[in-house]
Amino acid sequence: MKATILILALVLAAGVAANPLPQAPHVYVEGKAEVEVPVDWISLTVQVSGEGEDGAAARAIVDERARKLVEFARGIGVSDSDLGSRQLSVQPKHRYVQHLGEIELIGYQASQEIRISLRNLAHYSALIDTLLEIEALVGAQTRFHSTETPATMARAQLAAIEDARARAERFAEAAGSRLGPVHSLSEFSSRREEAALLRPGRVLEDGTPMMITPTSARFELGTPFVPGVTLVTAYVFAVYLLED
């Protein structure tokens, strides 16, 4: 009987220790802040493809198209450190012959992903024009970035803490209490102990990726480009004690 009581006491004590919220009256709030930063570089992920009677022919076509793209990028000042690619993929192509009831091989398709980081935005429109002129361009995805993001994120987090306190003060006043000292501050929305489940409350809003395909050429070719801004969002999760 004593052993059972001791085990139960230990379990209850462990549960109290694991609970991140205080036993005293408190308020638990989320703070949020958004800060705009100017876009000063762009990343593009380009997918090119080619078809041939055999794998070697398909690969040669893609190699040539990728070479032209990389040469153009280097020509507008893109450094080798801002260029990258994935391993070229070659797949057989088949078709179903209905009157024979068979599937036959009709050739091969090769594809490769090229990644480009463009630091000089004055060349963006020319780069897009070149992408659209490449035959068999499967598609290109553009994302907008800012080198000011790390410093801006720090400012956003401080502003989010101020927002959390303001929210907590409103809660305390509405409840007829006074806001006491902060009990905890966290950028993790999850309060579980498993580290794999913790996700920082930070968001870089680089917008919905812009997809560029050959069918969009009439909208993209020669279109003036204005980089605009990205949005940095920070969240904090705060627990404040309440005083009478």
Image: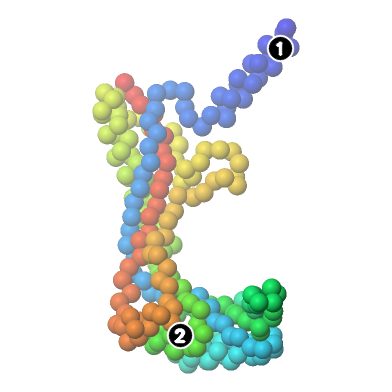
**Would residue 115 appear left or right of 204 to someone viewing this image?**
right
> Can residue 87 be seen from the camera position used here?
no
Q: Which residue is disc 2 drawn over? A: 131
Closer-to-camera residue (44/161)? 44
Residue at left offset 57%, top offset 82%:
49
Q: CA distance from mark 2 to mark 1?
A: 73 Å
**Would residue 87 appear left or right of 46 to someone viewing this image?**
right
- Inspect the image, locate mark 2, and give the three-letter code of the amino acid beneath it: Leu
Closer-to-camera residue (100/207)? 100
Residue 86 vertical position relative to residue 161 in the rendered view, above or below: below
Disc 1 secondary structure class: helix
How would you rate the neighbour count of disc 1 (Cα within 10 Å): few for under 14, some for 14-19, many for 20 or more? few
Q: Give the mark nearer the N terminus: 2 vs 1.
A: 1
Q: Quadrant of the N terminus?
A: top right
Q: Which mark is residue 106?
A: none
Closer-to-camera residue (97/186)? 97
Identify the image quadrant of residue 236: top left
Residue at left offset 40%, top offset 87%:
129
The location of residue 237, given as percent across then percent down, is 42, 41
Q: Quadrant of the C terminus?
A: top left
- Point out the residue furthest to the top here: 1
Residue 240 vertical position relative to residue 143 in the rendered view, above or below: above
The location of residue 181, given as percent across then percent down, is 38, 32
Residue at left offset 59%, top offset 25%:
15
- Inspect the image, locate mark 1, and give the three-letter code of the amino acid beneath it: Thr
How would you rate the neighbour count of disc 2 (Cα within 10 Å): few for under 14, some for 14-19, many for 20 or more? many
The location of residue 52, given as percent across then percent down, is 64, 88
> Can residue 163 be seen from the camera position used here?
yes
Q: Nearer the viewer, mark 2 or mark 1?
A: 2
- Point out the residue furthest to the front here: 99
Q: Which residue is disc 1 drawn over? A: 4
